[in-house]
Image: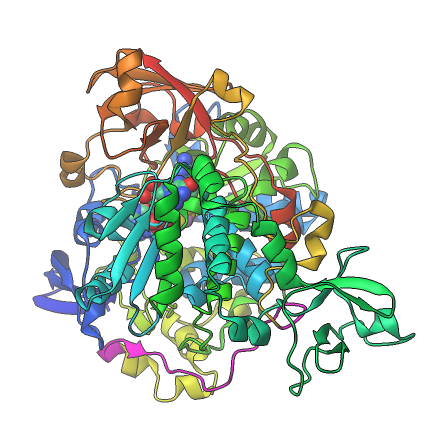
Amino acid sequence: MGNKGGKVTIRTVCGMPDYLRCGLSVEVTDGVITKVRPADFPDPVDKGACAKGLAASQWVYHPDRLRYPLKRVGERGGGNWQRISWEEALDSIVAKLQGLAAKYGPTSIAWTAPILSNLTGGGYSRLMSLTKGTWVDWWGCGDAAGPCADMATFGSPMGERYLRNFEDPKFTIVWGYNPAVTVHTFMRRITSAKKKGCRVVVIDPRFSETASHADEHVPIRPGTDGALALGMIHVILELGLQDERFIAENTVGPLLVRDDNGFLLKEGDLVEGGNQQGFLVFDESTGGAQPCDNPAVTPVLTGGYSVSGKKCRPAYQLLADMVQDHTPEKVSEITDVPADVIRRLAVSYATQKPASIYRGWGLQRSFYGDLACRAINTLAAVTGNMNLKRPSTFVLNARPFLMPGGPYTSIPLMSLCDAIAKGEPFPIKAIWCTWHNLINQMPNTHRIIGELLPNLELLVVCDLFMTDTAKYADYVLPVASFFECTDLCRADLEHPYLQLQQKVIEPLYESRSDFQIAVELGRRMGFGEYFNKTEEQYIEEILASGHPTMEGVSLERLKEGPVMAKTLDRPQQLATPTGRIEFYVERIKQFGQELPVYIEPLESARSEKAESYPLSLLSTHPSNRVHSTLVNITSLLKIDPEPALEINPVDAKPRDISDGDVVRVFNSRGQIKVGAKLSQRIKPGVVNIIEGWWHEQYIEGHLNQLTHDEINPVQQRILQANAAFYDVLVEVEKG
Ligand SMILES: Nc1nc2c(c(=O)[nH]1)N[C@H]1C(S)=C(S)[C@@H](COP(=O)(O)OP(=O)(O)OC[C@H]3O[C@@H](n4cnc5c(=O)[nH]c(N)nc54)[C@H](O)[C@@H]3O)O[C@H]1N2
Ligand SMILES: Nc1nc2c(c(=O)[nH]1)N[C@H]1C(S)=C(S)[C@@H](COP(=O)(O)OP(=O)(O)OC[C@H]3O[C@@H](n4cnc5c(=O)[nH]c(N)nc54)[C@H](O)[C@@H]3O)O[C@H]1N2
Ligand SMILES: [Mo]
């Protein structure tokens, strides 16, 4: 509860949109936050808070914070606003939403809320469910390629966890990941393993903060990680270091694939009316095909066979054939990683067991990032470096809370622009933008401003600040921060806790929590009975699943501190079509990607396009901010004052660029101006601008005017397309 008088200390949870959910112990004096410290956790390794959490009180008390609802006056984006009351704002917005829903259908109203099973996003989820609106699935804004790969390989978008978290790893690869900056909870685990003798290797085109804590840094050409993984598999197979037992028991390796059509051989192919899910392996002792789940059979992994006249080979043989020409020398040419390093990495990963991979998002933001992640998953599978244990978890009673009116439609972020500009696959006319700064953070900003905004009849933004998106809104609503409202913070795999985000101060000015805003909307839309309980009552409902993982967990218990998740004893059942780890994915055969083949990046520095734009542009995540959140905090600006282009002196010199010079960074989509920062830490041929800065902080333009929104159809088929933010070519000149 918010406290008015005296000095109290309240445990709450950091709600910054990095989703780390660190515990914070907040001292409040006479209703004002006076100190923020890291709070205790049952496992001390989880205690810690970073500059972001500690600066959050400056964010909450920032003089520029939005204070009351605003209505646009004049042109959109013209900067003229009229202060209005909440009553007036909500009444007029609801009238407009209902008018649009009547004219274009309820799915024409889109919401960008994060639907975690908590109140902040959950209130909007209830509204979407009751009104049959559309949820904008934000995952494709840079984070969906790995999940696509995991969906294909493991049947779950969260399968990345199978590659890591071994109790006592001997060898760890941190791949396209900078957890020293982005996921401190992981970095603490990596560092503690290293102290126990685990060797840590970081694969990254930049000598990142994480690389500086590692035993070895492997600089790689951006977008070529898939080739590296295939090269490592080549070495492993050549030396016979694969784990054949694991492959035979857990993967599609032994399943027979038909030579004539590339599909898995099924019982139904041999016997009229036979099982179409009955996958077959070749049994050498009987010299024939047998069901893959027959425990008496020892299936072969290699060779070619004829079964009832149908020629086939085990999927493992097809993988071996594919990696055959990925020699370390050839892969070295593709990746710029020396052949002996590829050999050494492969041998260490296959022999220093258990070996773990922490796979980040950096390598996923290439156009074929899903293929790279599938190749890495395959590398883990052929060596048996897999952790198939069920993670500890909580099973909440979230669904009735989130979807009291049943499920609703969703649209992948990468399809949002088409829905608004072209009405495809269905028209969207209004966006309720909460929790996101889409004009700043979506790729290809020119398209957002040129096509999305003009075709949108209503844009409502709920935020704490006048962000770039809020500037283009029709209504701007001041939102309460996580310090100013109660919520339930769910455990995730990195942080196996359920915690209570306790309100530490009353909402400042006229701000209201997202949940309270949803309540007010719901009541006005005629759903009052679904919004008539208190926050705490709803939290109690969400906790009351009766599931064994929730034993002893109550609101009262959570007020005392976090609860650690329990492990379920049920064995893991993979939800792939074969129930096995699939490095061979039959259903994308038509795209030629049934195996995790390597394809050059869309904007490859070795393509024709590179003659005009020879440098690969990355835009990595900021250290002391979360994307565009916290860009306006004075103390943090002292550490990192403005956008800059990191460029290697090898690339700067021929362009006559010195440290601090203003440079023009451009491609066919746009041009921007920033200061240059010469750095040996970035690989020649690669440049980087840390993402998140607001438009007004650039000398000219904005980073995302250079990025593109090309859709990868295979990703779309498997899960959803991902924004390839790091698959971008540019040229740089003094300027
Ligand atoms: N402080 C802070 N923490 C955050 C966030 C934040 O903005 N600030 N954002 C949160 C969110 S939403 C996310 S998605 C995560 C992101 O977390 P990370 O994945 O750790 O972040 P990135 O900076 O995108 O990329 C990680 C590294 O990948 C490298 N990289 C880029 N391209 C390639 C490539 O082709 N191959 C390889 N091998 N490496 C490559 C980059 O140089 C970078 O060092 O962080 C979360 N945590
Ligand atoms: N070029 C480039 N672009 C990128 C990326 C990249 O690496 N390079 N990364 C991409 C990735 S991985 C991601 S996840 C996206 C992130 O994109 P966004 O989710 O848009 O990230 P933020 O800029 O942090 O926006 C969060 C907004 O929510 C507001 N906010 C904070 N707390 C609350 C609250 O309690 N309620 C409400 N209503 N608002 C709140 C903040 O003030 C902020 O304006 O960006 C993507 N864009
Ligand atoms: Mo992200």
* x and y, in percent, of residue 370 in the image: 54, 49
Q: Where is residue 573, by image quadrant?
A: bottom right
Residue in front for this viewpoint, 292 or 342 = 342
Report if residue 556 is visible in the image.
yes
Q: How is the image coloured?
A: rainbow
Residue at image coords 36%, 56%: 513
47 relative to 212, above or below? below
Horizontal arrangement in the rendering, residue 213 relative to residue 436 (left or right): left
Report if residue 112 is visible in the image.
no
Residue at image coords 48%, 49%: 231
Q: Is residue 578 magenta?
A: yes
Q: Where is residue 207, by image quadrant?
A: top left
User: Which quarter of the figure is the C terminus placed in?
Assistant: top left
Residue in front for this viewpoint, 15 or 415 = 415
* x and y, in percent, of residue 618 in the image: 38, 34
Ligand 2 rendered quadrant: top left
Tally the numbered discs: 0
Residue at image coords 51%, 27%: 449
Horizontal arrangement in the rendering, residue 717 relative to residue 35 (left or right): right
Q: Is residue 184 magenta?
A: no
Residue at image coords 84%, 64%: 310
* x and y, in percent, of residue 525 in the image: 57, 57
313 relative to 104, above or below? below
Magenta residues span 559-579
195 relative to 322, above or below? below
